[in-house]
Amino acid sequence: MVMLSNRRFIKQLANWVTAITILINIYLYTYPSFNSERCSWSTTEVRTGSLTNWEGLVLQIPYFGDIFQQYFLDESKLEDNSDDIKILALGDPQINGNWPNTPYIKRLDNFGNDYYLGHIYRTMKRRLLPSHVAVMGDLFSSQWISDSEYYNRTRRYMTRLFPQPEQHTLDAMNFVDKHEDVDWRSFYGWMNGNLNDGSFLREEEYAYYDIYDWTKPRIKGEPLFINITGNHDVGYGDTTYQHLARYRELFGKDNYFIEYDNDTDHPWRIVVLNSLALDGPLLQPEFQTYTWQFVEMLSKQNYPGQTILMTHIPFYKREGLCIDGPFVEYFTEENALEDYRIGLLKSENHLQYETSQKVLNAVFQSGKPGIVLTGHDHEGCENFYSKDENNCWVADKTVKNKNFYIKEATVRAMMGDFDGHAGIMTGHLNKSTGLWEWDYSTCPFSVQHVWWVGQVGIALSILLQSIGFLI
């Protein structure tokens, strides 16, 4: 009797654990459907006149209606938004590393965190099919790591968090496989040579046109992947040639622009800007000179289209508009680990006021609405910049000038402590005005513990079902 009672208990427990695990994993793989409006492109609409009565009824049911639309509704019954600009923005993954003295429980946590972040990317990419994906800086948790550890994290970044086709990562992976210290001396020579001959003032140093894939031919269904420098990737005022050289070698240029549709009446572009080198003082002031020469080049372009600016540090705004208010800190004798850092820029929440004015004036000259995507403030924030009576840019929660304003969307961090958010930016062409209209929303997931429960539940279900079958 005791044996039968134990067997019955184990089988019931196995069934309960299995049922709960199935429900949790259904949530894990369909969580955007619980916030379907926030987790979709703003122009995702159904052609109501093409629906049958029962399709119309199903689509009105929360969660289930979105599941039906995603997996079962014929695409011909959706409004065509194929010409829209579709950018998936991911904020501050900040992946940690493992050291010889790292406890095994922390190693396991880092392992799981990689796949938690990767689950967010895979789920949103599969759902949205974005044209572009941008990681808004702070790819790693610290810039003060050896080249070897930097390569280890790069491999995890490109295979676990944001897996991409081999063609997209082949050069980076070949470089990582060599596991040799980065040749920062060659980068030093290149940087100073270009500064001396004025190359950084020339448009061709930064220009790309109609790029949707960094490789050729374009791989169907794969977005253009854009990495942006963060303070934990290259540093603030203490950025060295080693920091910037290895970032550029593995993740691409830190300053550039891509222009699209120049042969139409509605051109647009993406500008990627290394905001870590704008304010100073810097250990290597030539980085600041180079970055400001990029801004100067942009100011002389007189670009007629609309702009999406991507950078890590948000622009200056008054206290109270976001969780992070204005803050600047410099290295001092009390907080500098090495004397050479004293007086250099240590950290800042926003770009400083004058810097913000100069950059916004240089990038947004056309008088047409634009949008800025940033990271850094893990809580996320949204504001609008308009010119005041003194012709200065001022941030506010509402649009003050509907004819010309810049929306700034600070992408909430995708880390588990911030509920694994993903930013969704839609650009839709208003054919009556000939202008791109920008929309931004943020799609929440959940804390990382829910993902862990789903994975542990699978293993536990298999174990308990096996025991129940054998006894």
Image: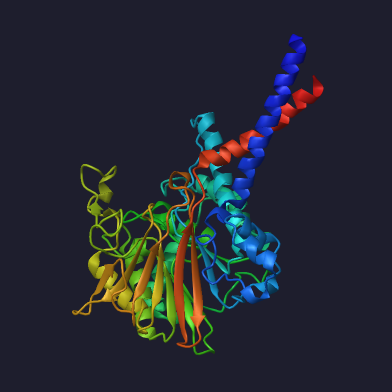
Work out whether 366 lies above or below 193: below
* Residue situated in front as seen by the camera: 69 or 202: 69
Q: Percent position (x, y) of residue 258?
A: 50, 76
Residue drawn 20% across the image and 44% down it: 333
* Residue situated in front as seen by the camera: 212 or 119: 119
Looking at this rendering, what residue extends furthest in the front direction?
53
Residue drawn 67% across the image and 63% down it: 167
Image quarter in which the C terminus is found? top right
Q: Percent position (x, y) of residue 277?
A: 34, 63
Q: Is residue 466 visible?
A: yes
Q: Percent position (x, y) of residue 105?
A: 53, 30
Looking at this rendering, what residue extends furthest in the top direction?
1
Work out whether 290 lies above or below 434: above
Residue drawn 59% across the image and 61% down it: 60
Work out whether 116 lies above or below 438: above
Looking at this rendering, what residue extends furthest in the left direction?
390
Work out whether 462 lies above or below 191: above
Q: Is residue 155 visible?
A: no
